[in-house]
Image (spheres, helix red, strand yellow):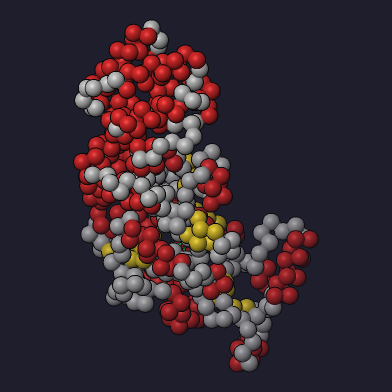
Amino acid sequence: MNTVRVRFAPSPTGGLHIGGVRTALYNYLFAKKHNGTFIIRTEDTDQTRFVKGAESYIFDALKWLGITADESSEIGGKHAPYRQSERKKMYKQYAEELVEKDFAYYAFDTSEELEEMRKRLEQAKSKNPSYNAITRSTMRNSLTLPEDEVKTLLENGTPYVIRLKMPRKDEIRFQDIIRGWVNVHTATLDDKVIMKSDGMPTYHLANVVDDHLMEISHVIRGEEWLPSAPIHVFLYQCFGWEMPQFAHLPLLLNPDGQGKLSKRKAAEYGFPVFPLDWFEQETSNIIQGFKEAGYLPEAVNNFLALLGWNAGDHQEIFSMEELIEKFSLERVGKAGIKFDINKAKWFNQHYLRQKSDKTLVDYLKNGLKTQNLGENLSDEQAIIICQMMKDRATFPDDFWKEAIYLFKTPDAYNEQAMAKNWNEESKNFVKSYLDFLKNYTGEWHHEPLKHDLHTLVEQSGLKMGKVMPAVRLGLSGVSAGPDLAMIMQIIGKEESIKRLESIILV
Ligand code: GLU
């Protein structure tokens, strides 16, 4: 394979959607696998949609995930600048080259004239109501107006756009690595504007010119860009440039399989769609990101890598190095993929369990600090707690959130659990257990405590499942959690007795 140069080309129009992150990741993996170059190009030609802070957000998000660029507006590179707004002057000559070659033309139509055309086509129930190979002949452009009039209009500074002259009857064919051959008839395409009246190129022109100038070998992007690909292919043909290879990635779908994964649906289901917290200007809301929700970067990468790419065997856990080694576009499928947040949680759990004791202790201690709790917690104690909570934690915060009762006497009992488990029988058992604890002289350690508790239950003739939840409620306020005897060991004798005394008053 020739030198691989790929690009992630986001438009800074808002928070970077997680689908965009996957596109960046696939580009990155592909580049690294082939010892190639991964470029981030900022496509900000549409100034009306530009959102302040969006570009730096993209960089921050990708850095968090370790998806680092070899060339970008941030670090520069041999084809700088990498921000299209700063390359503005470069595009005009290419648009004009196409006019000269008769692949494009000047169009002087005013917005009223365009509106009139739209109405006319609507009334005529046109199948392709657009500015195209047929309708262009009825409009005011350099193909219909006399040459000297065009010249005068241009000299007088009359506003114009440059449109691509799509052939009326032709077929555009190209091979997509993921989709195979794609054929599109030009009759279904319109005469796209490639240069706007303010001198700014549109997406199509800027994208193709930059891919060419930046020597992009593979265009790897989301399926939503597939309809644009024939226009791009046509542009390459018009310029006589060698084309990059295309790979259009499958869509990420909502969990119910209905439509493209949306911010709205994600909010409904309660999971993030942005990598980092995103401040939404329109609503002044902060939309929580994967990072702030407690996802680890390695889990997000692993999860995203498998949303579209089929590793080929049963392996699911991949480090970034392994992904780089094994990734291939040939194993990316065409079908849209339902977004399953439980899978992301599963990966998070996995990577959380790989963390060192020190990291887990930091999660616990930092979290407790935010609650003004656990000042006297020793490292030894903290390690015991982390080990105990490890199997129950999905997110770093779970180490303290799910174990908060180890540091604070519960101020309420879970109502449902009380309704289910708190009755005369369980209350009597707790009373007798309390008497036992008050007279307990053995070592305050989970092993003997557990043994004695079990013996007492057996002697009472009651079922474990009937009375244990009641003891647990008294100690923790909730009905599920780690080993009861461990909880008692950690909170100590005095506190255990105090808590059980409180619940029997209920
Ligand atoms: N600027 C486009 C976007 O926002 C780039 C599409 C492409 O990769 O060509 O995704």
**Residue 481 in the image: x percent, y percent?**
37, 30
Which part of the image, by quadrant, shows the N terminus? bottom left
**Residue 269 in the image: x percent, y percent?**
53, 42
Residue at (70% x, 72% y) in the render: 114
Question: Image height check: is 149 above or below 408?
Answer: below
Displayed quadrant of residue 247: bottom left
74 vs 287, nearest the viewer: 287
Q: In the image, is 236 to the left or to the right of 443?
A: right
Residue at (47% x, 49% y) in the render: 272
Residue at (40% x, 37% y) in the render: 409
Q: In the image, is 303 to the left or to the right of 231?
A: left
103 vs 85, nearest the viewer: 85
| Residue positioned most to the front | 439
Question: Image height check: is 376 above or below 447?
Answer: below
Displayed quadrant of residue 377: top left
| Number of dots carrying numbers | 0
286 vs 383, nearest the viewer: 383
**Residue 362 in the image: x percent, y percent?**
28, 49
Is residue 141 shown to the viewer in this render?
A: yes
Is residue 229 shown to the viewer in this render?
A: no
Question: Image height check: is 50 above or below 504?
Answer: below
123 vs 379, nearest the viewer: 379
**Residue 253 in the image: x percent, y percent?**
50, 45
Residue at (24% x, 27% y) in the render: 444
